Amino acid sequence: MKIAGVYPTSLLDYPDHISTVLFTQGCNFKCPYCHNSQLITFYNNIDNLLELAKKLIERRIGLIEAVVITGGEPLVQDLYELIDLIKWIKEKGLKVKLDTNGSRPVKLRALIDLNLLDYVAMDIKLPLKSYPMLGGEARDLKDEIKTSINILLESNIDYEFRTTVVPGLHKERDIKNIAKAIKGADNYYIQNFKASDNIYAPLWKNLKGFTPDKLKIFKNVAEKYVKNVKIRD
């Protein structure tokens, strides 16, 4: 397991739970608006961080309720190492939330079938036909993304789909097509883009997000297909 870092306490990353956030290293996408761009590339000098992360989690027991595994993209990690880590977390009496881009449906299904996940947050970057616009492996994974969507729709675990909306990249028709792809989902979150120095594409580091009125329009469009749509600004 390639661990990049740990955030000790979060009130935001797992709905209604206090969590510790575990960041994995490496991602198979290169989204230009990625806000964790420092985690895209794999590094080989961070093996000891897994044990340090476990020690921190153990010290947080009694203060936290869950561990969020995010990235990067957690499902590009070795599946058996990921299973071992999650089993270790569950043995501590903690819930597990997984953040994923949906590009590894076989691994996602395996973790669900093993009853290792309590909550999954899956990013829907763009309408499925537009994934080739994204960098990395995204151009070739439209079918895998759709499979992951169906896995969550048919599962019995808690989940959410979410889209980070970016001016110049997302329009109302894109939100409509995304919502149609997840039609019948329990939860869909529209997240506003926020510029930072960590954004992958330099030209986007000063880009301003959508106005509140525009976000509400996106929400209204998505509500025609999804039960519960919320804005995260």
Image (cartoon, grey):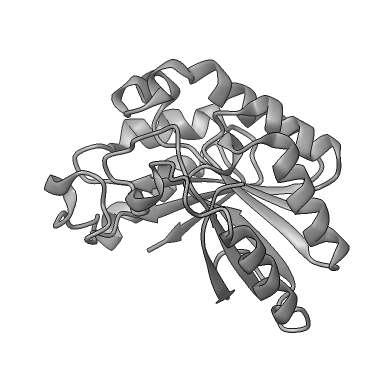
In the rendered image of this protein, does residue 51 appear above or below residue 2?
A: below
User: At which x and y percent is residue 217?
Assistant: 34, 49
Q: Is residue 225 left or right of residue 199?
A: right
How many numbered marks are there?
0
Q: Where residue 11 appears, x then y in whole percent?
A: 57, 75
Question: Quarter of the image containing the C terminus?
Answer: bottom left
Can residue 117 be seen by looking at this rendering?
A: no
| Residue 13, quarter of picture | bottom right
Foreground residue among 119 and 177: 119
Q: Which residue extends farthest bottom? A: 63
Q: Is residue 121 visible?
A: yes
Whether residue 103 is situated above or below residue 202 in the rendered picture: above
Asked which quadrant contains residue 17, the reply is bottom right
Q: Is residue 81 above or below residue 69?
A: above
In the depicted view, which residue is nearer to us: 221 or 57? 57
**85 or 172, nearer to the observer:** 85
Q: Quadrant of residue 231?
A: bottom left
Kindly identify the residue that appears in the image at 47 percent across and 45 percent down.
44
* Residue at (73, 57) in percent of width and height: 96
Tell me residue 29's x, y (percent). Answer: 40, 33
Q: Position of residue 3 (x, y in %)?
A: 55, 54
Residue depicted at 44% across the width and 41% down the height: 42
